[in-house]
Amino acid sequence: MEKELISVIVPCYNEEEVLPLFREEILRVSEEMTKAHPQLEFEFLFINDGSRDKTLEILRGYAEEDSRFRYVSFSRNFGKEAGMLAGLENSRGDYAVILDADLQHPPKLIPQMYEYVSSGEYDCAATRRVSRKGEPKLLSFFARSFYKVINKISQTQIVDGAQDFRFMTRQMVNAILDMREYNRFSKGIFSWVGFRTKYIEVENTERAAGTTTWNFWKLLMYSFEGIMAFSTAPLAISVVFSLLLFIAALVLMIFAIVKLSGTLAIICLICFVGGLQLLCTGIMGQYLAKTYMEVKGRPKYLIGETEETKRKER
Ligand code: UDP
Ligand code: MG
């Protein structure tokens, strides 16, 4: 019987509290799956994203006990995007599934995802939050607006509420790895590569333990990141503004000629134009900054240790 390997990829940043719970749950689910499908094999690949707590020690222990447990430990914190990328790059499976360590992405959904993808009907199965229950109102409002804006101004459609909990075929993983950009916005990348995706609708789940590292500010920055990575529409704003200004200037000129003048009008105009110029330069500067980072071609993460290097040490 042909073996099928599933890589379970878990980005971890200060997750010492939930890791034991996660391990127990993922082992339970994988056992259940191998019972139903004897050809299945698993590898559990944890990415330690520069945690300051005991996460790395715990992962070392898991890898020593059970060879299916692997880890890649970064030299510092590179962010969840880099974690997911490292997971995909270092995975060996015929399928890969990415999920959070805090059990907000319930592992018990993996069997269902596997069924969708292995049937050949879909290349990917992902979860989609249907309600934003338990989330601060203001945050929900901004999140909704973000999806509205980005879907209007970008060719890449991003599904509202789609999560990073994804089960994919090797083919789709390779497609994602072919996208070499530095400023990674996975929600956009997943959608840009295409492939047939099944969305499973889920309710919001609370974190099992530990604390989230996201706050409003980080989320806002992340959404700008997304817009800039998948749309050049903000660059066009300057063109629109300059057109409007041109018309305004024409109208003003007519007024000035007819009679009405006034220092106030001039001051207002100066402020207005100055502000607009700054805005447009700012937008260009942002894209330039992104281009700068891309051109530098820096590595997206650096590995400090893996279960293999650790084994060789001993
Ligand atoms: N995470 C990471 N690097 C970071 C921040 C978070 O690898 O810099 C991981 C974290 O360990 C968790 C997942 O990304 O497995 C989601 O993070 P979190 O639960 O803090 O975010 P939330 O669920 O609140 O969006
Ligand atoms: Mg979480």
Image (spheres, rainbow, N blue to C red):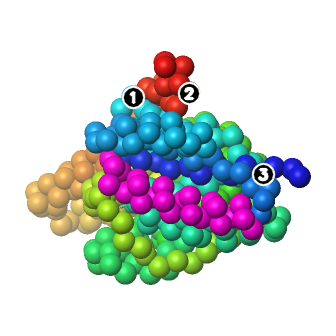
Would you name the residue on which mark 1 appears?
75
Q: Pointers 3 and 2 in contact (CB under 8 A)?
A: no
Q: Which residue is found at the position 37% from the left and 57% from the top?
A: 18
Q: Is the residue marked 2 within 8 Å of ligand 1, measured from its CB? A: no
Residue, disc 3: 4
Calculate the distance from the C-alpha at mark 3 to the C-alpha at mark 1.
Answer: 32 Å
Q: Which residue is mark 2?
A: 308
Residue 304 to residue 44: above or below: above
Residue segment shown in magenta: 14-36
Q: Earlier in the sequence, mark 3 or mark 2?
A: 3
Q: Which amino acid does the dot numbered 3 rest on? A: Glu
Residue 296 percent across, percent down from the top left: 48, 24
Q: Badge 3: few (under 14), some or many (20 or more) residues near its Cα, within 10 Å?
A: some
Query: Which amino acid lies under the numbered mark 1 shown in the image of this protein?
Result: Ser
Q: Position of residue 242 (x, y in %)?
A: 41, 53
The correct choice, above or below, for 294 with respect to 220 in the image is: above
Kind of residue indicated by mark 2: Glu
Q: Nearer the viewer, residue 122 or 52?
A: 52
- Label 1 crowd (10 A; few <14 / some 14-19 / many >=20): some
Query: Among all residues in the image, which is located at the extreme left?
Result: 263
